[in-house]
Image: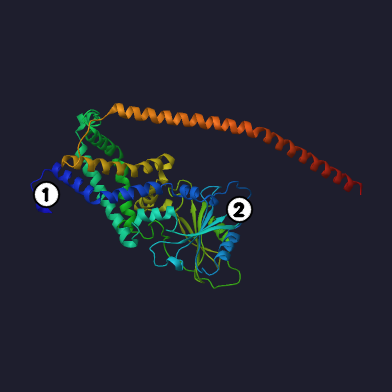
């Protein structure tokens, strides 16, 4: 390796690093990037593919947490131990009960049972295993390449390599302070390969900050123990729960229920919003209640935690993220930044586009390399043809909209008389029922 770089200038060294990283790991960058883009909207896609998971007309109050948990256990009576209830993200979403280690997927790295429950009726709507749905399979492909622990570590290494690739690309692009504007220009007249390369350079410099942030946070998520060692803390990784606390009270006939445990937890954080509650496992188990305080960066996995003893009903320990050290606070940002959760709707959309940006950068870069090796011939940019294709596409869209409008008009005109007739009949039926009810009330009043 040393002889490979010996005698090379820094620019030529960066060029070789950038090139060989793309040729060796580029396809993996694309795979991880595209699956990550899709996973940004994982919940939305899952609800689109499974309409039964959407509550169309939410009405009334939620059932009690104890009633909901009872319904989950009735649906899965042989699954003993701890369950975690995750609160819905919106009034139209299901509550999810998680069972971490089902026997069916026990030897998988991460494959819990996901039970979707309607919080308004306590009805168990669906029971699915992680990795056996489209969206969770894609997320497993993104996080571990479907290879469990080895794949998880590999994705972390890919994050480090992508960071090097991005930094080397920025160095190769950098034209100096006085030439930045000219470096952002795109030449439309020197052929398709040159055009693609110019767009490659401009696209790369715009997406570089986002890609670098995603690559670094992705590496941190794969190797959380490294950062925990640096900040001197533990239990801070995504999905971890902090210290394991056991009950010291004697089992009795009056255990604390889920609703009561939540009430006790709110004593420490009265304005906190319940996000998760984990039930005790065994006689020494303890409730773990995750609340989200205003201003806390994590939406779905907040670090505000209260442990409540099931037998004594006492709050055993409290974890407040606003009292974390600077290093611990930085750790709490990794997951929400990587997923786009901390960036809002616009930030999530930028993250969604970033994965497709990696794909374009890879394809355009490889085409440029193949052209330089004489494997791909350049061609002039035929703007007239592109213009004709664009006009044809616009015309097709316009004609489709016009036809759809005409069809809808015909359908409405045809159905309107029937709609009016149905409306009149409904009104007549309503008035008949109302008259009958009034007559009945009069007879009751006479007696």
For mark 2, does the 10 Å Cα neighbourhood hold few (<14), some (14 to 19), or many (20 or more) residues? some
Label 2: element kind: loop
Q: Position of residue 226 (x, y in %)?
A: 30, 58
Which residue in the rendered view is the most extreme toward the right? 447
Q: Earlier in the sequence, mark 2 or mark 1?
A: 1
Q: Nearer the viewer, residue 268 or 195?
A: 195
| Residue designated by label 1 | 5
Q: Nearer the viewer, residue 437 or 252?
A: 437
Q: How many marks?
A: 2
| Residue designated by label 2 | 120
Seen at 64% across and 49% down, the residue is 60
- Residue 228 seen in this snapshot: no
Q: Badges 2 and 1: C-beta atoms under 8 Å apart?
A: no
Q: Position of residue 82 (x, y in %)?
A: 49, 65
Q: Position of residue 172 (x, y in %)?
A: 19, 39
Label 1: element kind: helix
């Amino acid at each position: 390796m040393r002889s490979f770089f010996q005698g090379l200038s820094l620019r030529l060294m960066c060029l070789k690093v950038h090139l060989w990283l793309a040729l060796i790991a580029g396809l993996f960058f694309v795979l991880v990037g595209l699956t990550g883009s899709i996973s940004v909207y994982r919940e939305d896609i899952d609800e689109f593919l499974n309409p039964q998971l959407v509550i169309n007309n939410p009405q009334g109050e939620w059932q009690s947490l104890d009633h909901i948990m009872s319904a989950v256990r009735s649906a899965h009576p042989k699954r003993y131990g701890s369950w975690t209830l995750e609160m819905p993200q919106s009034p139209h979403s299901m509550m999810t009960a998680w069972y971490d280690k089902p026997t069916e997927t026990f030897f998988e790295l991460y494959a819990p049972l996901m039970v979707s429950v309607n919080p308004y009726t306590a009805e168990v709507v669906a029971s699915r295993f992680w990795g056996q749905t489209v969206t969770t399979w894609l997320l497993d492909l993104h996080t571990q390449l479907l290879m469990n622990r080895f794949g998880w570590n590999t994705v972390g290494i890919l994050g480090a390599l992508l960071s090097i690739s991005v930094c080397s690309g920025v160095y190769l692009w950098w034209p100096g302070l006085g030439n930045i504007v000219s470096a952002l220009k795109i030449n439309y007249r020197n052929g398709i390969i040159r055009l693609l390369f110019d767009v490659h350079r401009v696209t790369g410099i715009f997406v570089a900050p986002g890609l670098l942030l995603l690559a670094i946070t992705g590496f941190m998520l794969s190797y959380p123990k490294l950062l925990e060692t640096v900040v001197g803390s533990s239990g801070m990784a995504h999905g971890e729960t902090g210290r394991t606390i056991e009950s010291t009270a004697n089992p009795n006939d009056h255990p604390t229920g889920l609703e009561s445990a939540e009430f006790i937890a709110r004593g420490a954080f009265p304005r906190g919003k319940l996000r998760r509650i984990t039930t005790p496992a065994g006689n020494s188990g303890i409730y773990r209640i995750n609340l989200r305080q205003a201003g806390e960066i994590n939406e779905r996995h907040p670090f505000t935690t209260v442990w409540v003893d099931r037998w004594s009903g006492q709050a055993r320990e409290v974890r407040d993220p606003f009292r974390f050290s600077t290093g611990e606070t930085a750790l709490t940002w990794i997951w929400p930044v990587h997923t786009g959760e901390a960036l809002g709707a616009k930030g999530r959309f930028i993250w969604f586009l970033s994965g497709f940006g990696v794909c374009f950068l890879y394809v355009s870069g490889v085409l440029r390399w193949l052209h330089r090796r004489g494997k791909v011939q350049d061609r002039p940019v035929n703007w007239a043809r592109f213009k004709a294709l664009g006009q044809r596409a616009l015309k097709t869209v316009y004609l489709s909209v016009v036809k759809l409008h005409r069809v809808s008009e015909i359908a409405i005109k045809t159905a309107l008389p029937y709609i009016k007739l149905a409306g009149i009949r409904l009104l007549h039926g309503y008035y008949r029922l109302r008259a009958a009810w009034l007559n009945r009330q009069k007879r009751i009043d006479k007696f």
